Amino acid sequence: MKLLVAVDLTPSSAAVLREARAWSQRLSAAVTLLHVADPDPDFIGYEPGPDTVRDAIAHKFRREQAELEKAADELRADGLEVTALLLQGPTAQTILNEAGKIGADAILMGTRAHGALRELLVGSTSKGVLHKADRPVLLVPPHDEPDA
């Protein structure tokens, strides 16, 4: 079994990683840990900016890759088979494309909605994945506290 686990590298990713660990252990599933870095909208369709801008973007990607690898290493320490990927593109579509590419049996990802609004509002990325997914999607709330 294969699980695609999409993380945004915010503090709410901890809940997603806890669920990924539990589901992977229960199902003996391989995990592909995915972070989608949005392209900088100021530079889409334009030549690269000055060296300082390219350096700043490269630094951001290196930092995100390091965070992603750290999360993957924590899962590997529990004996899980984990691949870490940092891809660039439109978030929901990139998640769906990668799920198809690896043949994921399910997608795990977090939500950003809080409190009672969680019932009514799911983030745009989550909505995009839910509406277009051709496989099960598990949405993980940002924390374990009950709704307000």
Image: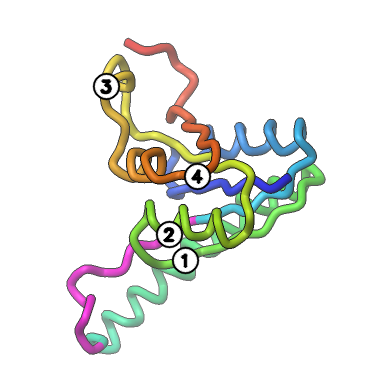
- Badge 4 vs badge 2, beta-carbon distance below 8 Å: no
Image quadrant in which the N terminus is located: top right
User: Callout 3 environment at 10 Å: few (<14), some (14 to 19), or many (20+)?
Assistant: few
Q: Per the image, is 46 magenta? A: yes
The residue under label 1 is 87
Q: Which callout, 1 or 3, points to the residue nearer the camera?
A: 3
Mark 4 or mark 1: whose residue is earlier in sequence:
1
The alpha-carbon separation of the residues under discs 3 and 2 comes to 25 Å
Looking at the image, which residue is at 41% across and 73% down?
59
Sequence order check: which comes first, mark 3 or mark 2? Answer: 2
Q: Measuring 74% from the left and 43% from the top, which residue is drawn there?
A: 29
Badge 4 marks a residue whose secondary structure is loop
| Residue mark closest to the camera, 4 vs 2 | 4
Q: Which residues are the magenta region?
A: 35-47
Mark 2 element type: helix
- Which is more foreground, mark 4 or mark 1? 4
> Dot 3 lies on which element?
loop
142 on left or right of 32: left
The residue lying at 42 percent from left, 12 percent from top is 146
Residue identifier under label 3: 120
Name the residue beneath numbered marker 2: 94
- Please say if the residues under marks 1 and 3 sit with CB atoms less than 8 Å apart: no
N-terminal-most mark, 1 or 3 = 1
Callout 1: 10 Å neighbours few (<14), some, many (20+)?
some
The mark nearer the N terminus, 3 or 4, is 3
> Which mark, residue 14?
none
Amino acid at dot 2: Thr
User: Label 4, on which residue?
Assistant: 134
- Percent position of residue 45, x then y: 21, 81
Q: Residue 37's x, y, as percent?
A: 39, 62
Q: Mark 2 vs mark 1: give the one in front.
A: 2
Check disc 1 and give the amino acid type. Leu
